[in-house]
Structure formats: structure tokens, C-alpha cells
Image (spheres, rainbow, N blue to C red):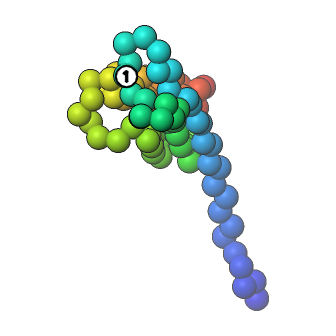
Amino acid sequence: MNILYNEEKTQTDVYRYKVNQGGDLNIKVSNGSDRFITITFVNGKFESARSDLGDFDSRSNWYVFGGIAEQIKKLEKTYDS
């Protein structure tokens, strides 16, 4: 008798980006820390996007969220190929 059967393997791809904080974007915290975005795909499908931007109140944050949405679209196209 096989104790372990029906093996399943998942592939997780994690993309990490540093937010470009120059120009009109004003999202640095008081100590000047960099901000990062992490986009995760599991088995070629979008799983999640996480950021350390904080709340949605800042207009600058909304530009970054728009950039995240665009990057997710680009990554999805690479999986569709």
C-alpha cells in the first residue's frame, strides 16, 4: 500500500519591485525608507500584490497602485505565452 499518493507540485513566482520615489511622488516616510511592492503568481496565475505604502489617502499612493495594476497585466501576458 502507498501511504503517500497523488503528488501535487505548485510553482510560486515572487516579483519584488522598489518604488521609484522621484519626481512628483511623495511617499517616503520620515526616515527616507524605500518602499517595495511584491507581486506573487502561483502556477502562472495572479495570487496577490502586497505593498508597504500604508493607507489609500495619499494621491501619490494611487499612482503607485495604478503602476502595480499595469505590471500585473504585463506579467500575466508572459504566463499566457
Given the current orientation, which residue lies at the most extreme left position?
Answer: 57
**Which residue is depicted at the point 38% across and 18% down?**
25
Residue lying furthest right: 1
Up/down of 73 relative to 42, above or below: above
Question: In the orientation shown, which residue stands out farthest toward the top?
Answer: 23
Residue 26 in percent (x, y) is at 37, 22
Q: Residue at x 65, y 49 (%)?
A: 11
Q: Quadrant of the N terminus?
A: bottom right
Q: Is residue 32 left or right of residue 61?
A: right
Q: Residue at x 23, y 34 (%)?
A: 57
Front one among 11 and 29: 29
| Residue 56 image-quadrant placement | top left
Q: Label 1 is placed on what type of residue?
A: Asn
The image position of residue 32, as x and y in percent, is 49, 31
Instruction: Give the quarter of the image for residue 54.
Output: top left
Q: Is residue 21 visible?
A: yes
Q: Nearer the viewer, residue 26 or 50?
A: 26
Judge whether residue 45 can be spotted in this image. no
Numbered disc total: 1
The extreme front residue here reads 31
Q: Is residue 4 above or below residue 36?
A: below
In this figure, which residue is indicated by the disc labeled 1?
26
- Apparent side of residue 17 relative to residue 3 in the rendered image (left or right): left
Looking at the picture, how far across and down is residue 18, in whole percent? 55, 29
Q: Residues within 10 Å of mark 1 (few under 14, many from 20)?
A: few
Please state the horizontal and vertical placement of residue 33, each as a whole percent of the image: 51, 34
Residue at 47%, 46% in the rendered image: 47
Q: From the image, which quarter does the C terminus lie in?
A: top right
Element carrying mark 1 = loop
